Amino acid sequence: MTASHPPLKVGVAGAGVMGRNHARVLADIRDFDLTHVFDADASTARGVGEVYGATGVDTVQAFADAGLDAAVIATPNRTHGDVGVALLERGVHVLVEKPIAATVADAQRLIDAAKANDRVLMVGQVERFNPAVEAVKRAVADEQIISIQITRVGPFPPRMGEVGVVIDLAVHDIDIIRHLTGSEIVEIQPQLARTKADREDTALLQFRLASGAIAHITTNWVTPYKTRTLQVATPNKFVVADLMTRQVTEYFGQQPDGSYSTRGVMSWPNEPLKKELEAFAHAIRTGETPAVTGEDGLRNLEVALRCLGEG
């Protein structure tokens, strides 16, 4: 890092599981200096702040007044709009955790505030930075995608409060589908069920994209073990990725007898959250469009809300 680039003063809003993860990674990136942690619970804010030598604050006002260059918002979804707009209007660059907001109107407010104040607004769709997803993207780069199948299942997470599986889990996969195809979702067939929770905890979602590709997401909180798999079919290949082990396999060259060749596709052992936060710093430094834009976040949210019958 050159002398002309002092580290960016950064804060984390929301000191829950995800916020603490962001704080841990930010403290390890040279381009950032973690100076403030906001949480509505003062002792939580102080406690997490102390771990990283940052100041804990318990009001949005104090956080917005902290003289930050950049901030990560990991507060509950319904607060993303207000917290984000308050920061953007103070000239702070914002990375907001997925989903971008709880409503389309709040998402649009964030996009408009970023534009009006010429600040970076990036959405934390961390799976885009999963090396296995990047490897699949490279493997199918010159291919026409016919179908995508994603399975993201596991036990009920005790941290969940206000949302069901569509907003918590499927938003990741809606983004992966849009990212891999470079196309928008035009048809949606959702099937939702409640098994144990008061929100939907099981979802089977089918999509058709403008490109003609079809996609299917299976997601739930009722499977006793965690599975995260991505399968992509093209005319010449079938690519399978395990998003947890990061193992990616390509099947190709099918013969008349039904046999075909396989090869492993290299994926690098990077921490996706670190790659995401480095990409945020890069967008701030260069003025380039961030890897995941506010508009991406808005599209992902619109599709998720349509799946819930709220779009």
Image (cartoon, rainbow, N blue to C red):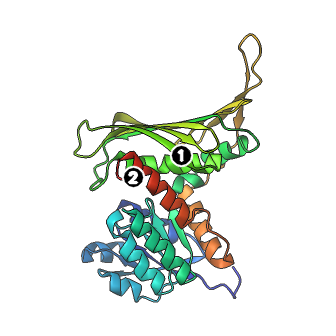
In this rendering, position of residue 59 left or right of residue 92: left
Examine the image and state in which quarter residue 231 appears: top right
280 shown above or below 149: below
Element on which disc 1 rests: strand
| Sequence-first tag of 1 and 2 | 1
Measured as percent of width and height from the top left, residue 263 is found at: 72, 31
Question: Can the viewer see residue 53 in this picture?
Answer: no
**Residue at image point 66% right, 77% down:** 287
Instruction: Measure the alpha-carbon separation of dots 1 and 2.
Output: 14 Å
Pick the front one: 211 or 126: 211
Horizontal relation, residue 225 to residue 146: left or right:
left
Q: Which residue shows up at 50% across the image and 72% down it?
A: 111
Looking at the rendering, which quadrant does residue 247 occupy? Answer: top right
Disc 1: CA contacts within 10 A as few (<14), some (14-19) or many (>=20)? few
Q: Amino acid at mark 1?
A: Val
**As drawn, 50 above or below 241:** below
Choose between 253 and 21: the one closer to the eye. Answer: 253
Check disc 2 and report its element: helix, strand or loop: helix
Callout 2 crowding tier (Cα within 10 Å): few <14, some 14–19, many ≥20: some
Rendered image: mark on residue 186: 1
Q: Give the residue type that dot 2 points to.
A: Leu
Q: Are marks 1 and 2 in contact (CB under 8 Å)?
A: no
Task: Using the rendered view, name the quadrant where residue 278 is placed.
Answer: bottom right
Between marks 1 and 2 in the image, the one whose residue lies nearer the viewer: 1
The N terminus, quarter of image: bottom right
Classify residue 171 as left or right of residue 103. Answer: right
Residue at left offset 58%, top offset 69%: 280
Residue ID for mark 2: 305
Q: Position of residue 60 (x, y in %)?
A: 34, 81
Residue 30's place in the image compared with 263, above or below, is below
How many numbered tags mark residues here? 2
Residue 183 in percent (x, y) is at 62, 49
